[in-house]
Image: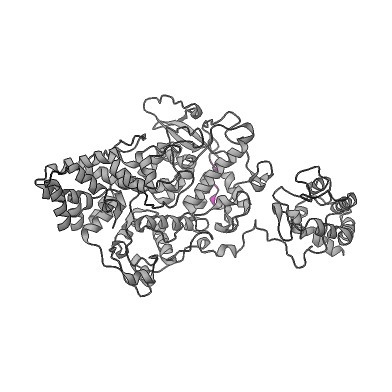
Amino acid sequence: MHRLIITLLISSPLLAAAATLPADHAQRMTRGLKTFDQEVSVILKNNCLGCHGGEKVKSDLDLATREDLLRGGSHGPAVLPFDAAGSSLIDQLNHVKEPHMPDGKPKLPADAIAKITAWINDGAPYSGPLIAGKKPKRDASVVTKEDRQWWAFQPLKKVKAGSIDELLLKKANGLTYNPPADPATLVRRLYLDLTGIPPTPVELQAGIQNPNAAIDKLLGSTRYGERWARHWLDVARFAESTGFEQDYDRPFAFHYRDFVIKALNMDMPYDQFVKWQLAGDEYEPKNALALAATGFLGAGVFPSQITANEVERTRYDAMDDMLSTTSSAMLGLTVGCARCHDHKFDPFPTRDYYQMLSVFTTTTRSNVDVWPDRVTSAVTTMDKKKSTTVQAGATRMMICGEGYDPIVMHTQGGPFFDKTYLLKRGNPDLKDGVMAPGFLQALTKPGSEKRWQWQPPADARYSGRRRTLSNWITDVDHGAGFLLARVIVNRLWQHHFGTGLVLTPNDFGKTGTLPDQPELLDWLAGQLIAGGWKLKPLHRMILQSRAWQQSTQRSPEKEAADPSNALFMRRTPQRLEGEAIRDSMLAVSGLLDETMFGPGTRDENSRRRSIYFTIKRSLLIGSMVAFDLPEPLVSQGTRPTTTVAPQALILMNSPQVRAWAEGLAKRVTSAGDAKQKVTNAYMLCFSRPPNADELSRGTAFLQQGGELADYCQVLLGLNEMVYVN
């Protein structure tokens, strides 16, 4: 009997962690077992088990086994062994604490409550589960070896291959590639892929003569960064206002957008790109570009008018936005789902979530003045829509960091709390211990935690927590770096082919899709790492592959064998995003303003590239929304491609489209006769001459008195203008 009692005591995590036990605990447990067997078990079965361990488990409180009882539920611990007075279950049974138990039924008789009280004071022992054969729930806070078997949590496989094509053809199931697209189509595809703007006739001819030189030219073009930065800004949920009802402007948030463009153009190694976005101020606190990178963390929504009792919850919401976006954008994981409970599908315990959340405990938004040799705090009161004059030679930018004067978005409390707690059910009123920074067990080799720790200098303004996180997230051998590489190469593939190798780019977990080409995914990730995390060589590798260069020729046999084109044995036409559609029309009209960087605008008459539109959450640019600009509330891994009437109506009636059509008409006015005008317009818009029927119809329209601008507007509205073949 004493051996059984000792076993029962040790099996309780709560008691095992206790500093002391009652001196007579063995005798009390013996007495408690007798009470349990003779009376308490019957009371619990008849009155409690129906909701807490039988057919259902309300509030996550399971009474079927002692281990589950002591683990507690969503309202915290229900029973403290040897302490009935401190056990919330007794207060609930006595109806002095909500929720009253049994729920919706009369209070238990006084003698029944007395028996349960005595049993708890005697240690709340069980002689066995209340349901025969019932086993305690597995402790989801511990990630097992089996949990780590999921493909995304496995290290990169070493794949022997010489090219993308070798790996794709290896799994082609007897299918073969389509023939290559014609040279002009490939050059147009190349320009739209890398820059979002079609080639001029001169560029077209140069690209046809030397395709590899064209690839190098475009990867070195400033337009490359403007095109591909837009893809990342979707993932980063970038916007320049606070959201919610007031939706106040963040007038200096554009520096983050400029950082992304500059980083991509200079081919910043992707691991550095990630590190700076998480902790640029901790890496290079005097580097304006590194500081601007931290705008990634602060780009999310944040309410500006809250009541005093919302301050703590709002702060946890802000940190959750930082963590959830980091995990979705960089790791393709839905870690945010573990905020209120252990993740239902992936091995992300709530404890892991709050350990990672604590990395951002003191991270806040700030507006700072940046000089070439120093950085000083200069806060703008955002909730009053005021801005201050920047001293000559300085640049004002919004950053996310520690130690600077944080932007005060409300008057009900400080911008952050000194500690982060584990919250039961995500409720700030149910705190369950202070959390120290930590990482996902599923992506951490046991015993490796100290290798990423970084201690800042004694006089530093920052804690070093975010730099420590960045060390873990980029560590290929012991941390999450292998998954970081998989996720970004999948995003590159997605934007070049229309779909990723993993169709759910923000979810590599069990609710996402499995990779159709796992060997290719791992090989590409390995190539990225071996190449120093440089993205441009990977672009070049994709663009030079036979897979990318295929035609869009239809084949009933291929479509029947591979309806979703998971084998990539043919090319699927892609519609351009709204920004690239607008930029292409501006470019062919000759009206494009190539001014880069700086504050944006909401004026749709602007002739700058679309990436320089100011993104105000409550007033998104209408033409961009019509062409599927996503809501910048959370990380967006993909955009839908809809076909709706407003798209055609914009192209037919928009004053901006009309101005572009008139600009295009001016470009071809001096081209000679009607045939030459039609030919030149086709070359500018579609990188090809018109066929005989198109030439005949266009020429006839102009010769019969049709306006050249009207004809040009028709061309701008054709499918060929907005689709990449």
Q: Is residue 222 visible?
A: no
Quadrant housing the C terminus: bottom left
Q: Tell me which segment is drawn in magenta.
A: 452-456
304 on left or right of 23: left
Most distant residue in the left direction = 673
How does the figure colour the protein chain or chains? one colour
Residue 522 lies, with reference to residue 372, above or below; the image says: below
522 part of magenta stretch: no
99 on left or right of 671: right
Q: Position of residue 110 (x, y in %)?
A: 89, 49
| Residue ID at (33%, 41%) | 610
Residue 227 lies, with reference to residue 539, above or below; the image says: above
455 part of magenta stretch: yes
| Residue ID at (84%, 57%) | 43
530 on left or right of 311: left
Instruction: Give the total of numbered labels.
Output: 0
Main SS type for the magenta part?
A: loop
- Residue in the foreground of this view, choosing between 449 and 108: 108
Q: Position of residue 480 (x, y in %)?
A: 51, 55
